[in-house]
Image: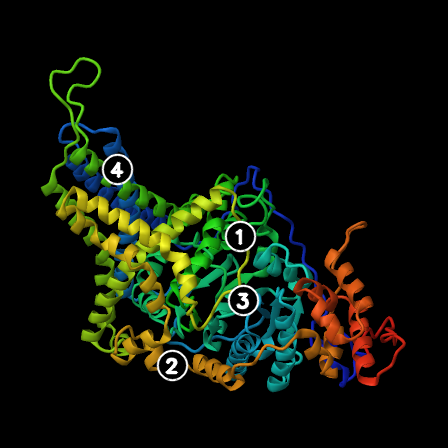
Amino acid sequence: MDPLTPAQANPSASATSRNTWFLPQAAPLAMPEQPLRYHATPTPYLDSSPARVRARRAFLLLLTFALTAAAAEQMYLVLNVNGLTLLEAVVLGLYVMLFAWIAFSFATSLIGSIVIWSRSRPLGIDLRKPPPGLTTRTAILVPTYNEVPDRLMARVQAVYEAVVEIGVVAYFDFFILSDTTNPDIWIAEEAAFLALRDRTGGHERIFYRHRANNVARKAGNIAEWVRRFGGRYPQMLVLDADSLMTGDTIVRLVAAMESHPSVGLIQTLPMIVNATTLFARVQQFAGRVYGPLIAYGLAWWHGAEANYWGHNAVLRTQAFADYAGLPLLSGPKPFGGHILSHDFVEAALMRRGGVAIHLAPGLPGSYEEVPPSLTEYAQRDRRWCQGNLQHLAVLGTSGLHWVSRLHLLTGMGAYLTAPMWLVFLVVGIAISLQAQFIRPEYFPSGFALFPQWPAEDPERAIWVFVATMALLTTPKLFGYLVLVRDGTVRRGCGGGLRALLSVILETVVSGLIAPVMMLSQSIGIGQILLGGDAGWRVQQRDDGAIPFRGVVHQYAGHTIFGLLLAGAAYAVSLPLFLWMSPVVLGLVLAIPLAVLTSRPSVGGAWRRLGLLLTPEEGTMPRILARANALTAAAGATAAVEACTRLLDDPALVDAHWAMLTEGPRQRGEVNVALVVGLAKLEEAGSLAEAVQWLSAQEKAAILSDRRGIERLIDLKRHGCEGLAPRIVGPRATKDDKRPS
């Protein structure tokens, strides 16, 4: 079924006016908010072997339990030489929980490596066959928030051309869903969108919508689209602003949805690309070598209860609308309000509704980028941390599958392990300091025949440490073995020897970064518990460099804490200091580590040595090369003030006017920024004066209001023609509300 064009939706539209269609005809779809507290039984779903999936889960959990129990016994023997003290009991409890986390990851990686060797095909997707034909329409959604417009449109164009090239563009519409709040970026975004449609000729396929009020952030952005246009599209494919997906992959995903009516979501495994800094290149290499092991292992035991990562996935629109409407959490921020980490919750609610959620790690052609620096990563991580801790309020939702609850728990655990590790280290040193400097209470209160004091088994402790580190690093060995087995991947990583050196380098750099992230996440959790809100920061995509003073301010506390740990460990003994050195070294070197790993020159030096290479760098996918070429052709565009840029381009004024939408407003609700902005415009004698007076928020409000735009046009004309009286702006008719 071929999608309706604007001219077909409105037969009276002329060929000339066709280019002024920036959104298709509305096709509303109800998306009610889902209650979290009610008894619901999930609808049975179609699955070829539910018993086999249950057996897989039992095996994974038993393996995790067996490893954890063995480690717990050995740690108990280390600490229980003369009985457990309170501090030693705390250390034991923390160690068991942390080790269970490590064991679970180890078991998943082990299973994933075995699955990769078996070359299984998820959902019957056979890459050896050409992509199947399509019968339904799909919307490709690209949410954006204050991104660089030319870079964003380059990626949209690359994906659009990939779909055109494969011959199925008639079944796809593209929606750029803007939540941009910076007015300068917003107007540049509109100009870049118009240029994109002119370059591609996709006036009937590529659409743009800007939300003046970005309520509920990305989740609200997608939900607003569903409620306005979702009725026309059986599927929606969600990309991020930095995402890419090949035409072949898109077609196979949509075809899999068409042939599996019980499936509501298929999540791909995006590969990290375009990394330039050392920090990003380490993430890129680790994701390429170790990521598939985890993903294949997860898919093996997830079955139809997989998870959603928020992008690079295809969703059944009706099922998403029926089951994934997110409620507003009660209470104040940071735990109350809109759900930040929405993807986990949406997947859990869809599964509760009875549709299957699948992970397809074997489907190539899905790409994303990663923050370029430790600082940028930590800022994004802080927002994710708050969102994942919100899941505590969702965990008890009625009717959730137990695997969906496990997803929510692991999401929280990814951050709660940081303060657990921190407490484990601090309490461990406290025990050592107590034994070294504090006289033991030989005869405590109450009757005792023998004295009691803290004591440990040092030899067994060494073996416990070695075993724990082995379990941490063995998945890296699994990844390397899988890598060298695949000739294409091995050559793409620089050959077997260079790949091995890259694994070692990645392990060292990640090991130094880990304690820094541990402390940052622990601080973040503390701020959240004290009521701090992460907000919604703009994501840095390219150069990760920040001023040195900013780095010092960010990581001086890490350095001081590392020095204190080092001093405490050395005061106990040199062996303890050496044992603590990996953690201490990362913290003490936090400042130079953050600086060096954020520089593209450092990342480039390692690349020239043939280290931390990935196959996508050696043989760049066509869609990635095209997106990068389009970005480079656009160049570094200087920021232009929004009002000036808009009013200097009559075609842009015309398009902007046509794209304006009036959001719902309750009686008595006043847009303070708009009221103040209009008042300033009335006082202003020229456009330059108005621009100088308006704040960014007021400017955005003015540009969202036709009265404000009329006054801006008036000021522009006044400056150009030297007219003293005010010129009234364009008179809009009911059918054509655009300025002349």
Marks 4 and 3, how far apart at CA: 46 Å
Residue type, numbered disc 1: Leu
Q: Is residue 550 visible to the viewer in this orientation of the structure?
A: yes
For residue 91, the mark is 4
Q: Callout 4: 10 Å neighbours few (<14), some, many (20+)?
A: many
Q: Earlier in the sequence, mark 4 or mark 3?
A: 4
> With respect to residue 32, does 707 lie above or below?
below
Q: Earlier in the sequence, mark 3 or mark 1?
A: 3
Per the image, the residue denoted by label 3 is 237
x then y, percent, for residue 472: 24, 54
Q: Label 2 near label 1: C-beta < 8 Å? A: no
Q: Earlier in the sequence, mark 3 or mark 2?
A: 3
* Mark 4: amino acid: Val
Q: Are marks 2 and 4 in contact (CB under 8 Å)?
A: no
Work out how far the residue at label 1 is from the one at label 2, CA to CA, in angstroms.
34 Å
- For badge 2, the amino acid type reads Met
Q: Is residue 467 visible?
A: no
Mark 1 Cα shell of 10 Å, populated few (<14), some (14-19), many (≥20): many
Query: Viewer-nearest of labels 4 and 3?
Result: 4
Q: Name the residue beneath numbered marker 1.
A: 340
Q: CA distance from mark 2 to mark 4?
A: 48 Å
Q: Secondary structure at mark 4?
A: helix
Residue that appears at 67% across and 55% down: 30
